[in-house]
Image (spheres, coloured by chain):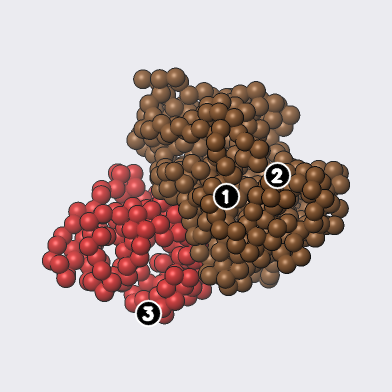
């Protein structure tokens, strides 16, 4: 019997010839990541473990992203805890505001996570790096602390579910719609404890930005990790960025999958996840055209250059502005994305349309700052979660969508489609 | 080791944003976090929960973010144990790692009602409901996880394996 990507990458990092789903193994970790929410607890636990130095100062990435630029004194203390630890442990990579961004945007962008890597991160969306063909999974602070100390962690080798996408995407349909449709199909615990492998013509035709969006949201189906195949798209993206050598893996043709799920893209509409769950997914044509108070375009899900290109394209082609009653928060996911957007002239375009463009932060996605919702407000967001209370008041309502639907809704002042413009 | 407490019953897919909203994640203090535990779905919980009480959830308990603040807030509120039909994987690791006992049993979780008195035997992995008189066998922990629990969490376990004196 052949092996899945999860089995191959874990075996390589467990220094074993092969492992199978269900095995419990100790693995060597290539990259450890934590942010300004999870790292403070991890640093405390690291001190409690009692080792003096981290296992490898080149491979620990502490990224202040969630409440930065610091939103209050307590958040400032947390961000300072990261900076001091990075300094005292002489970590090679530093991520200060102005030279940084959202961890899941900057780590792939800078070639710090690579195909075949085993990555653990103190953030559930660490699974994003599966788009590069890495085994990447979120963990809590104590696991991160021990991995920073030892360079190792324990894993149960997951079973793998296979997702095959056929056909050509329609206009205004992106990776975001493919993953929302998938989560809607299998539910928020449909991939609990499992790996998800994505394949088919619909995946081959996706650029890296859409692949990162899809891998980002596998946790919303309960998944442990997700994998895009390593192909020419991956190679081109990685070659330009890699900071070290890497080993791509491919799943065997006769690998053992617990289930196979097939989707036809040719008749798929843009998808919207309605409150209060990412699996409450409907085609946009079946969503009530509710009045919208805020639109958020950004986050680790849709905060990359290609996402803002969609916004700019719609604004330029229609010549429209955003609706005067809607707050439109546009937040590039990294300083590099910000600069690319700036050089295209889109910051001026977005600003003239009535949008508020900000420096990079996770802020509004988790109800932190830069766009917190009042009770009963409605937000269309390109982010990944619409749980009760996620973006502010418990009675606020968040609809998750792709950047085209978000832009159209921002212009119309209600949930809508670009074809309506 | 036996735990006894009254049941607080919650549904399926209890996510970490409702266990502890992100607006409180600018602190790591267990007491502050406990004061806001579950407030977006049950405003009475934090003020009414008694030391030793047992939280009962449905499927996929603790889904969503990796914030360890979630089990820390529950433990800080005095909850002795969580019984659920199933747990989201990051939450499962986090709870075990910080020494908050959690048990998976579909039947025990479904039968329990708010206010029921449960007795949990962690060694035997059993849950007894005083109201129904029924005893349930929880899913066994993998041996490795059991070793972490017995050490009192992942930090003491790691100290032991690295041979660091306490």
Q: Is residue A300 above or below residue A410?
A: above
Q: Position of residue A66 (x, y in %)?
A: 64, 58
Residue A263 visible somewhere in the drawing: yes
Q: Position of residue A361 (x, y in %)?
A: 69, 56
Foreground residue among B155 and A144: A144
Does the CB distance between marks 1 and 3 fall below 8 Å?
no
Foreground residue among B118 and A417: A417
At 47% from the left edge and 50% from the top edge, which residue is drawn? Answer: A279
Q: Which residue is mark 2?
A: A307
In this view, the mark in front (3 or 2)? 2
Disc with the residue nearer the chain's start (1 vs 2): 1
In this view, the mark in front (1 or 2)? 1
Tell me, for residue A284, which label it has, or none: 1
Q: What is the spatial separation of the Cα atoms under label 1 and label 2, in whole angstroms? A: 18 Å
Tell me, for residue B160, which label it has, or none: none
Secondary element at tag 1: helix
Q: Position of residue A157 (x, y in %)?
A: 40, 35
Q: Quadrant of residue A238?
A: top right
Q: Chain of mark 3?
A: B
Q: What is the spatial separation of the Cα atoms under label 1 and label 3, in whole angstroms? A: 42 Å
Residue B121 visible somewhere in the drawing: no
Q: Is residue A368 above or below residue A418?
A: below
Q: Colour of chain B?
A: red
On the same chain: label 1 and label 2? Answer: yes
Q: Colour of chain A?
A: brown
Q: Position of residue A272 (x, y in %)?
A: 56, 50
Secondary element at tag 2: helix
Q: Which residue is mark 3?
A: B48
At 56% from the left edge and 67% from the top edge, which residue is drawn? Answer: A396
Secondary element at tag 3: helix
Quadrant of the snapshot with the N terminus of chain A: top left
């Amino acid at each position: 019997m052949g092996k899945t990507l999860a089995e191959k990458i874990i075996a390589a990092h467990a220094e074993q010839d092969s492992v199978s789903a269900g095995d419990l193994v100790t693995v060597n970790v290539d990259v450890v990541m934590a942010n300004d929410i999870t790292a403070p607890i991890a640093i405390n636990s690291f001190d409690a473990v009692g080792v003096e130095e981290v296992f490898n100062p080149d491979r620990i990435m502490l990224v202040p992203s969630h409440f930065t630029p610091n939103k209050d004194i307590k958040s400032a203390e947390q961000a300072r805890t990261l900076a001091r630890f990075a300094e005292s442990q002489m970590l090679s990579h530093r991520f200060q505001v102005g030279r940084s961004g959202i961890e899941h945007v900057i780590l792939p962008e800078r070639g710090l996570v690579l195909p075949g890597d085993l990555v653990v991160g103190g953030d559930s969306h660490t699974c994003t790096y599966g788009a590069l063909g890495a085994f990447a999974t979120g963990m809590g602070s104590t696991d991160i602390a021990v991995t920073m100390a030892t360079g190792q962690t324990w894993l149960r080798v997951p079973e793998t579910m296979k997702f095959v996408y056929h056909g050509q995407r329609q206009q205004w349909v992106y990776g975001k719609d493919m993953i929302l449709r998938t989560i809607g199909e299998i539910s928020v615990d449909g991939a609990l404890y499992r790996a998800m492998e994505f394949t088919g013509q619909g995946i081959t035709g996706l650029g890296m930005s859409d692949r990162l969006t899809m891998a980002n949201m596998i946790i919303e189906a309960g998944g442990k990790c997700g994998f895009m195949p390593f192909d020419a798209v991956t190679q081109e993206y990685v070659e330009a960025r890699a900071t070290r050598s890497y080993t791509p893996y491919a799943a065997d043709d006769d690998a053992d999958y617990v289930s196979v799920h097939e989707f036809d893209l040719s008749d798929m509409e843009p998808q919207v996840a309605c409150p209060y769950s990412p699996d409450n997914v409907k085609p946009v044509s079946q969503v009530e055209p509710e009045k919208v108070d805020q639109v958020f375009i950004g986050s680790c899900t849709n905060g990359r250059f290609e996402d803002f290109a969609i916004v700019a394209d719609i604004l330029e082609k229609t010549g429209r502005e955003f609706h005067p009653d809607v707050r439109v928060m546009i937040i590039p996911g990294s300083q590099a994305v910000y600069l690319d957007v700036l050089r295209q002239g889109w910051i001026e375009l977005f600003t003239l349309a009535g949008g508020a463009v900000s420096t990079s932060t996770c802020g509004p996605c988790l109800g932190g700052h830069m766009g917190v919702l009042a009770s009963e407000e409605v937000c269309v967001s390109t982010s990944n979660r619409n749980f009760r209370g996620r973006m502010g008041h418990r009675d606020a309502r968040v609809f998750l969508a792709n950047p085209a639907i978000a832009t159209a809704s921002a212009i119309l002042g209600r949930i809508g489609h670009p074809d309506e413009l | 080791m036996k735990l006894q407490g009254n049941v607080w019953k919650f549904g399926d897919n209890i996510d970490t944003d409702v266990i502890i909203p992100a607006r409180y994640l600018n602190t790591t203090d267990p007491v502050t976090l406990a004061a806001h535990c579950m407030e977006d779905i049950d405003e009475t919980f934090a003020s009414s929960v008694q030391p030793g009480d047992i939280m009962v959830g449905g499927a996929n308990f603790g889904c969503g973010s990796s914030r360890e603040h979630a089990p820390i807030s529950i433990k800080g509120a005095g909850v002795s144990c969580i019984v659920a039909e199933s747990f989201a994987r990051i939450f499962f690791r986090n709870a075990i790692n910080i020494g908050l006992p959690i048990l998976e049993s579909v039947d025990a979780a479904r039968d329990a009602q708010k206010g029921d008195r449960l007795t949990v035997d962690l060694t035997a992995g059993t849950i007894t409901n005083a109201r129904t008189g029924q005893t349930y066998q929880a899913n066994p922990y993998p041996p490795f996880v059991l070793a972490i629990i017995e050490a009192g969490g992942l930090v003491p376990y790691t100290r032991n394996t690295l041979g660091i004196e306490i």
